[in-house]
Every structure is written in structure tokens, then in C-alpha cells.
Image: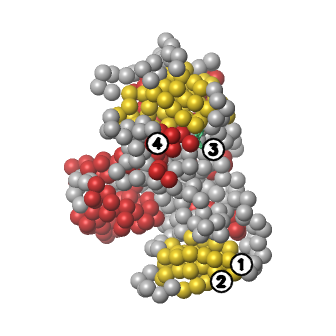
């Protein structure tokens, strides 16, 4: 490996929202001489999994006012939308198509590059490994070349697991999602936001047959309402308690707010500034309990649907076009041209079978990095440069986003951002949280202090 040289340099691996936001924050500081290389294997920047959605109805689930790339310029996205013809009179409480947000992020990146000519290099390649040495970090690409920089940041985001059912269930929009009889009954596994995407794709294809939605908890995402967050004093938040205690406190606050004419959403949103601290204040046991018992419930209240989509979904449930079944999926086998799915309804031990035309797996995104199919993650874990966090929901990182090796030492040069760091921060899935993480990390990279 040749030395990284004089000018500070950063290689960012992954050009989805997290990679683009970090690049933009790094290049924003006019007083530094940073050189940024952003590497993305999809060929498109700013899209990633979320914002490469192709349909108009696949909407961003945060109102436009919350989606600026820069937390210190909250109107940035809203101003951009107005240049694209969004009428100011509609106000910034709008939910735009996710593909449009991807265009915004791409332009944020383009502008960042134009503002610091020669400081941004973008490469459409896959990264296969990263090696940390004394002189710098070497990022190796699938084409056999490599880049040496002072720092490398993993922004590889989400990973979709292969569909369940030994290849019989399919992912919506995949090659195996061939045209269906529009009257056919289908089953969707999972009842979260990915299910909503699948249901919208089926609706777009004019599917009229029943959609049986199967999930263990049978919970559907709630809808947004334009209500302000309540102010919660840090001193009133029960940091460091256990899950039952915390839940009682939270429910009491919701009751109190609703008795005063308020809305539960104001409590969920009022808690947001503390979510990472609450997570970090819990013991590993409490975090596990939360993941096992409370996460589905938290997700439906926290990650909400735009109101018009929520109303549409509620109508589809009322008319029976969508049938929600609380059950465990136990398997699927081929049955003539269709499939036979096995489920175990919640609270029972009986196994039921249902014959349908197809099973769609909307089980969400991969959670255990040990099962990752991403070559760079596999390589880092295999050679001990990285390890899973204790709950196996991401990579182990320290409070400053430094990747922790298998011997427990935090790296000086290899960092991570975005959902990959959820074991440490938990609430690090959505843009409002990721942009703050990127701003903090950019500042640390640009202005290192002896304590970092
Ligand atoms: C379906 C869906 C909808 C969502 N909707 C919203 C929303 O409306 N609002 C919101 O705030 N949040 C939303 N989120 C949350 C989302 O996590 C974040 O907004 C954000 O998109 C995460 O971006 P990311 O770059 O970290 O991850 P990703 O989007 O997964 O991007 C990672 C990128 O890294 C690239 N990559 C991975 N490995 C390599 C490699 N080895 N070499 C080169 N490139 C590589 C991938 O190709 C990918 O483009 C949504 C998430 C999903 C899954």
C-alpha cells in the first residue's frame, strides 16, 4: 500500500442516502482541503434501496419539512421542491415520491462537487475489501484496482435477505415476479412498510384478487397527522430503566397528552431527540427485550404512513381486498401453478394451509451482518477487522462511529454511518437522524482532536 499522501482524504463506500449526505457534509466546509471518493455499485447516486423506488405512490414517509439534507438548513429540501414546481401554498407538510427524493440527493451531491472543484471523485464500482495499514486505508474494488485514503467510511446501508420458502416466495419487482392473473389471491409476508410498497405495486398493476397479509403481530403501520411534538424535559425521561417501567411511563405520558386534547403522535415525536440516548442507557437485556417484544409495536407508531396512503390501506382492509392475518409463516410448497402456504395463527398450535397464486416476501431488510452477502462486510468480519454488535443488528462501532475489530479495539481509520450502526444508535434509519450523524462525523474527520 502506498501512503495516502498530504491532503486529507476520505473514501466513502456506498452512495445511497448515507454516503451522499456524508460526502455533502464533508465538502461543505470551505476551510478544509479534503478529497472525497464516493463509490457506489448501483451506478446511481443518492438512490440506495429506499429512493430507487420506481412508482409515484412509493412515498417518502417523513414530511418534506423533515427531509432536508442539512439539519441546520431545514428548508433546503422544501426550497428545492419549489424549484420543481411544488406550490408554496401547499406547505411543507407533503409526502413526495421517494424517487423524487433520490433526484434531490443526487443534486445535493452534484452541487457539493461543483462547490469544491476537483475534490470529489465518484466511482461506479463494487468494493470487495478494505485493508487498514499505518499509511492509510486501502479500498479494493471488484475491478482489481484500489484507492488509498486516510479514512474509509462504510455507508453500505441495507441488505435484502433472499426470499423465504426455499426460493418459492418471491420479492416484489424481482425477475421472478412475473405477471399474475389480476383476480388471483396472493399472500404477503410481513405487515410493515415493505408490505405497503408491495400492496401499492400490486394496485398499480391493477391487481384485484385478495391480498392476504400474514405477520406474527398482525399490526399495520399508523398514519401521520400534522401535530407538533410535545416538549419533553430530559430530566423527565427515565433513562436507564427497564422495558416494562419505560413502557408504563410512556403510556402515562400518552394518556396525559390525550386527556389534554393532544395526540399520541406528539409524544412519539417529542421523544425523538432522546431515542438514541434512551437506547444507549439500556442494558443489553433490556435492548433484547425491546427488540423481541416491543419493536413491532414501536415501528408502527414511529414509522408512519402518509395520511392519504394510510386511508387507502384502511379502505382496502375494510373492503376485504387486503386481509390481515396474525400468524407465523411456517413454510410454502409448490401446488400446481400456484403455491400452498402453511401458517400457524397467533395463540394457537394448529397449522393451517392456504392455497394462493404466489407468496411475496416483504420481511424487510437483513439484520445479521454474519449472514451478509456484501463482499466488503464478509471480508471485514472474516479477517477480524469488524464484528457484529452484541445484538447482531449491525456492525459494532464506538460512540464516534469507529468500527470495532474482533479484538475489541476501535479503528483509527475505518468508520461507519447509517443503518449499519443501529446496534449502537438504534434510531439511525431515517434521514433526519442520518444527516445529524453525518454532520457530526464530517466535523470529526475534518477537525480531529486528540480525544477522537
Ligand atoms: C424501502 C425503504 C423506504 C424508506 N423510506 C424512508 C423514508 O421515506 N424516509 C426516511 O427518512 N427514511 C426512509 N427509509 C430509511 C432509509 O434507511 C434511509 O432513509 C436511507 O435511505 C438509508 O440509506 P443508506 O445509504 O444508509 O442505505 P442504502 O439505501 O441501503 O444504500 C447503501 C448503498 O450502498 C451501496 N453498496 C453496498 N455495498 C456496496 C459495495 N460493496 N460497494 C459499493 N457500493 C455498495 C448500495 O448499492 C446502496 O446504494 C427507508 C428505507 C427503506 C428500506
Q: Is mark 3 within 8 Å of ligand 1?
A: yes
The residue under label 3 is 47
Asked whether 135 or 452 is in front, the reply is 135
Residue shown at the point (71%, 78%) measured from the top left = 338
Q: Mark 3 or mark 2: which is in front? A: 2
The residue under label 1 is 338
CA separation, marks 1 and 2? 7 Å
Q: Earlier in the sequence, mark 3 or mark 2?
A: 3
Q: Position of residue 102 (x, y in %)?
A: 64, 44
CA separation, marks 3 and 2? 37 Å
Q: Under tag 3, what secondary structure?
A: loop
Asked whether 369 or 246 is in front, the reply is 369
Q: Earlier in the sequence, mark 1 or mark 3?
A: 3
The residue under label 4 is 382
The residue under label 2 is 355
Q: Position of residue 409 (x, y in %)?
A: 33, 34
Image quarter for residue 333?
bottom right
Q: Is mark 1 within 8 Å of ligand 1?
A: no
Direction from residue 285 to residue 201 in the image, left or right: right
Amino acid at each position: 500500500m502506498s501512503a495516502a499522501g498530504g491532503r486529507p482524504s476520505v473514501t466513502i463506500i456506498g452512495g445511497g442516502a448515507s454516503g451522499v449526505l456524508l460526502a455533502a457534509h464533508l465538502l461543505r466546509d470551505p476551510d478544509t482541503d479534503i478529497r472525497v471518493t464516493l463509490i457506489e455499485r448501483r451506478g446511481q447516486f443518492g438512490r440506495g434501496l429506499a429512493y430507487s423506488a420506481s412508482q409515484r405512490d412509493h412515498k417518502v414517509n417523513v414530511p418534506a419539512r423533515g427531509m432536508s439534507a442539512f439539519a441546520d438548513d431545514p428548508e433546503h429540501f422544501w426550497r428545492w421542491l419549489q424549484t420543481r414546481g411544488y406550490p408554496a401554498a401547499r406547505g411543507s407538510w407533503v409526502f413526495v415520491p421517494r424517487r423524487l427524493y433520490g433526484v434531490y440527493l443526487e443534486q445535493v451531491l452534484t452541487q457539493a462537487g461543483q462547490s469544491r472543484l476537483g475534490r470529489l471523485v465518484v466511482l461506479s464500482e463494487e468494493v470487495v475489501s478494505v485493508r487498514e495499514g499505518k499509511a492509510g486505508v486501502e479500498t479494493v474494488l471488484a475491478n482489481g484496482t484500489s484507492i488509498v485514503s486516510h479514512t474509509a467510511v462504510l455507508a453500505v446501508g441495507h441488505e435484502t435477505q433472499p426470499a423465504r420458502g426455499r426460493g418459492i416466495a418471491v420479492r416484489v419487482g424481482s425477475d421472478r415476479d412475473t405477471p399474475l392473473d389480476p383476480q388471483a389471491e396472493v399472500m404477503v409476508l410481513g405487515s410493515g412498510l415493505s408490505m405497503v410498497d408491495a400492496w401499492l405495486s400490486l394496485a398499480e398493476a391493477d391487481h384485484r384478487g385478495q391480498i392476504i397479509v400474514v405477520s406474527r403481530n398482525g399490526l399495520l403501520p399508523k398514519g401521520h397527522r400534522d401535530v407538533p411534538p410535545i416538549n419533553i424535559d430530559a430530566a423527565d425521561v427515565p433513562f436507564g430503566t427497564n422495558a416494562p417501567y419505560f413502557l408504563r411511563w410512556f403510556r402515562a405520558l400518552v394518556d396525559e397528552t390525550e386527556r389534554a386534547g393532544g395526540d399520541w403522535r406528539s409524544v412519539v415525536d417529542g421523544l425523538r431527540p432522546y431515542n438514541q440516548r434512551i437506547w444507549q442507557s439500556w442494558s443489553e437485556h433490556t435492548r433484547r427485550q425491546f427488540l423481541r417484544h416491543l419493536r413491532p409495536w414501536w415501528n408502527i407508531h414511529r414509522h408512519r404512513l402518509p395520511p392519504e396512503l394510510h386511508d387507502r390501506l384502511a379502505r382496502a382492509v375494510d373492503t376485504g381486498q387486503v386481509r390481515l392475518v396474525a400468524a407465523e409463516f411456517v413454510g410454502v410448497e409448490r401446488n400446481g401453478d400456484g403455491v400452498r402456504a402453511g401458517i400457524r395463527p397467533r395463540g394457537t398450535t394448529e397449522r393451517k394451509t392456504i392455497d394462493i397464486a404466489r407468496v411475496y416476501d416483504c420481511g424487510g431488510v437483513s439484520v445479521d451482518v454474519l449472514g451478509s452477502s456484501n463482499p466488503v462486510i464478509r471480508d471485514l468480519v472474516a479477517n477480524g477487522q469488524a464484528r457484529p454488535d452484541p445484538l447482531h443488528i449491525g456492525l459494532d462501532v464506538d460512540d464516534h462511529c469507529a468500527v470495532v475489530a474482533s479484538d475489541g479495539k476501535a479503528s483509527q481509520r475505518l468508520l461507519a454511518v447509517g443503518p449499519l450502526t443501529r446496534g449502537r444508535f438504534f434510531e439511525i434509519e431515517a434521514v433526519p437522524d442520518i444527516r445529524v450523524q453525518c454532520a457530526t462525523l464530517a466535523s470529526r474527520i475534518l477537525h480531529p482532536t486528540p480525544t477522537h
